[in-house]
Amino acid sequence: MKGKILIVDDDTAHLSMLKTVLKGWGYKTNEADDGSTAISVAQDTVFDGILMDVKMAHVDGIEALQEIKKINPAIPIIIMTAYSSVETAVEAMKFGAYDYLTKPLNFDDLKITLERSLEHMALSRENLSLKERLASENCLSNMIGSSPAMVDLKKMIQTIAPSEATVLILGESGTGKELIARALHSCSMRKDEQLVTVNCAALSEGLLESELFGHEKGSFTGAERKRDGRFMQANKGSIFLDEIGEVPLTMQAKLLRAIQEREIQRVGSDKVLHVDVRIIAATNKDLLNSVKDGSFREDLYYRLNVVSLSVPSLQERREDIPILARFFLDRHAAGNRKSIRNFTPTAMNCLTGYGWPGNVRELENAIERAVVLCNGNYISERELPPALLQDMEDNTKASRPLAEMAGLPLGEIEKEAIIQTLQKTDGNKSEAAKLLNITRTTLNNKIRKYAIL
Ligand SMILES: Nc1ncnc2c1ncn2[C@@H]1O[C@H](COP(=O)(O)OP(=O)(O)OP(=O)(O)O)[C@@H](O)[C@H]1O
């Protein structure tokens, strides 16, 4: 099927002739014998194009064209007009007709014009979807990472951002949770409104309530005038509740009401205010554990956890270290007006070999420092924080040379890797598991299997 065309003509013989011709060319058709029928059919059915007579008894073609364009501005409408009334055709073009054909119709012209109009429509659609894709890619453009975990995360952000769902972002400190909250907001329908951020850990219990919900004048010492809270400031936009796991229990009930009912009350006021906000929260805590030990309300946890996004630690996506490093090098070199080209291979080895317990934030800080210290064209290991260099030296010292390992059974190599990693972490299994990119349970199983320790 080439496309679905609505034919509008009050001359029934002409209408049925056009229907036969178009069907013969592979089009699907619907018919209307006056302008008002055409408008109501176009309201209910999606067409790829419309072929419309101008002179009709009730609502004429020009009027119908204007109404249909209001319903679907992109639809190509081809006007059919008598040779004697070309001015009408010009008028139709002014109102957005795609083209006009004079009657009696020349079928070759009709065929070509129809095909061209449909191609035009397909191109506009493609253009629109490209624009939409570009816009959503743009809002993710400062989120660097091409590891499978980051690719999945970005896809998930694109999928859930346009919804109104509450999102809970989970991940270690410095993994980019705030960056993700920003991407969620800027890929959403609310992007033109504000994204208001609240760091729930930074405020005392008393201050947090007034910060979130606002206060009335005189409601507490120091409240000299009435003030809107962050929820009200975020009205129509989004609110990002960072470190949600730190909200004290007494505040959690009020927060639950705000999230569940979108209702808030200023401190010192009985008036219930309604807010329209998208909620994004983040934590580096294991909230389920907090639920179990009674420090976090279960109902609030489930309200927040409508969609959750787990952000991998940098250790879990080591392959992203070189591009992140390059990205931060460019950013900070530009900021410091330096023309540093790259890292020396040893410096890059240091970067990729380090554990980055502080995740992307630690990496960015290390590179910013190196940029400031660097006087040449390349950042060397000397400009990197001493911990990285120490780490590399320890590794080199402790390591059994690769040549010695060649030819050993894989199990032996694995055992050696575990022993060396445990030495490096002073026997700390959680840290060793992280470095080895396995879970603590898997590490324990392997320790038992190889009778290590
Ligand atoms: N994928 C990434 N691409 C580029 N920059 C990143 C990425 N992830 C994190 N960053 C940068 O690292 C720094 C820390 O990120 P962010 O503040 O979002 O982390 P966080 O998880 O919210 O940390 P915390 O839990 O401590 O609040 C920021 O400067 C951020 O721009």
Image (spheres, helix red, strand yellow):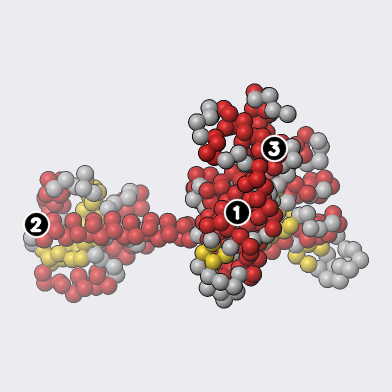
Helix, strand or loop under label 2: helix
Which one is in front in this view, the residue at disc 2 or the one at disc 1? 1
* 3 or 1: tag closer to the N-terminus: 1
Cα distance in 3D space between marks 2 and 3:
82 Å
422 left or right of 70 in image: right
Task: Please name the residue that numbered disc 2 is placed on.
Answer: 107
Instruction: Give the residue at x 28% y 55%.
Output: 122
Q: Quadrant of the C terminus?
A: top right
Q: In this rendered view, identify the residue nearer to me: 102 or 297.
A: 297
* 2 or 3: tag closer to the N-terminus: 2
Q: Residues at badges 2 and 1 in contact (C-beta under 8 Å)?
A: no
**x, y (%) of residue 60?**
25, 63
Q: Amino acid at mark 3?
A: Leu
Q: Residues at badges 2 and 3 in contact (C-beta under 8 Å)?
A: no
Task: Please name the residue that numbered disc 3 is placed on.
Answer: 422
Q: Quadrant of the N terminus?
A: top left
**Is the residue marked by circle 1 packed among few (<14), some (14-19), or many (20+) residues within 10 Å?**
many
Task: Tell me if the residue at label 3 has its CB under 8 Å from ligand 1.
Answer: no
Q: Which mark is residue 350?
A: 1
**Is the residue marked by circle 2 packed among few (<14), some (14-19), or many (20+) residues within 10 Å?**
few
Q: Amino acid at mark 1?
A: Cys
Instruction: Give the residue at x 18% y 56%.
Output: 115
* 2 or 1: tag closer to the N-terminus: 2
Helix, strand or loop under label 1: helix
> In terms of image quarters, where does ligand 1 lie?
bottom right
Cα distance in 3D space between marks 2 and 1:
73 Å
Instruction: Give the residue at x 81% y 68%.
Output: 226
Q: Residue furthest front?
A: 404
